[in-house]
Image (cartoon, rainbow, N blue to C red):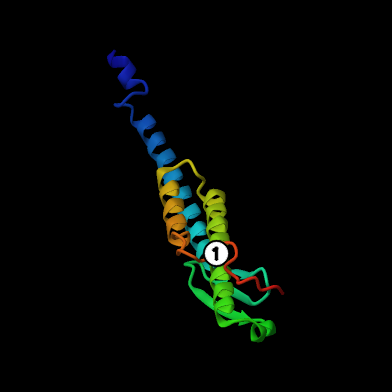
Amino acid sequence: MVSGALDGGVLDPGGAMDRMRAWKGRIDKLAADTKVMSDRLQDLRVTVEDDHGLAEVTVDSAGALLDLRLGRQIQRVPPEVVAQAVMDAIRRAKEQLAERSQEIIAETVGTESAAARAIAERVGRQLRPDPEPGWGESGSSSGWQR
């Protein structure tokens, strides 16, 4: 019993050092992977156009609107249709951003750890808020055609 403890158990200094080095290696790799994930998420931008070509939006990694471009045809449609097109494009851009963020998390830190799952869940909640009533419902564009 005592010899087992001395030959590779708790009291074996060589074995303890090996376990510490292996643990440090895993921690160093996780830190490096987390840095890569953070950098890639920070640089992420998504640009989406609505289905009618009225609005094109670009959002950053946090889902904030960076750019909005309106098509010429907005002059021929009611303002509420333009507003709906902008909101739809923003919603779709954030959805794509959430999907791409999930991919980056899986590619860099994986999906097995509790930390990775927590990060992925937080990103999903931040970028996929509950839809506003009335927005994005079928028929909400007042029948306007391109």
In the rendered structure, the answer to whether residue 100 lies left or right of residue 5 reads: right
User: Of residues 23 and 59, which is closer to you in this image?
Assistant: 59
Residue 71 location (% of width, % of height): 67, 81
What crowding class fits label 1: few (fewer than 14 Cα within 10 Å), some (14-19), or many (20 or more)? some
Relative to 120, say whether 20 is above or below. Answer: above
User: Of residues 98 and 104, which is closer to you in this image?
Assistant: 98
Residue 104 location (% of width, % of height): 55, 55
Asked which quadrant contains residue 82, the reply is bottom right
Residue marked by disc 1: 136
In the rendered structure, the answer to whether residue 51 lies left or right of residue 122 reads: right
User: Of residues 133 and 35, which is closer to you in this image?
Assistant: 133
Residue appearing at x 33%, y 23% in the figure: 9
Residue appearing at x 56%, y 74% in the figure: 86
In the rendered structure, the answer to whether residue 20 lies left or right of residue 127 reads: left
Res. 67 visible in picture: yes
User: Of residues 133 and 45, which is closer to you in this image?
Assistant: 133
Q: Secondary structure at mark 1?
A: loop
Q: Total label count?
A: 1
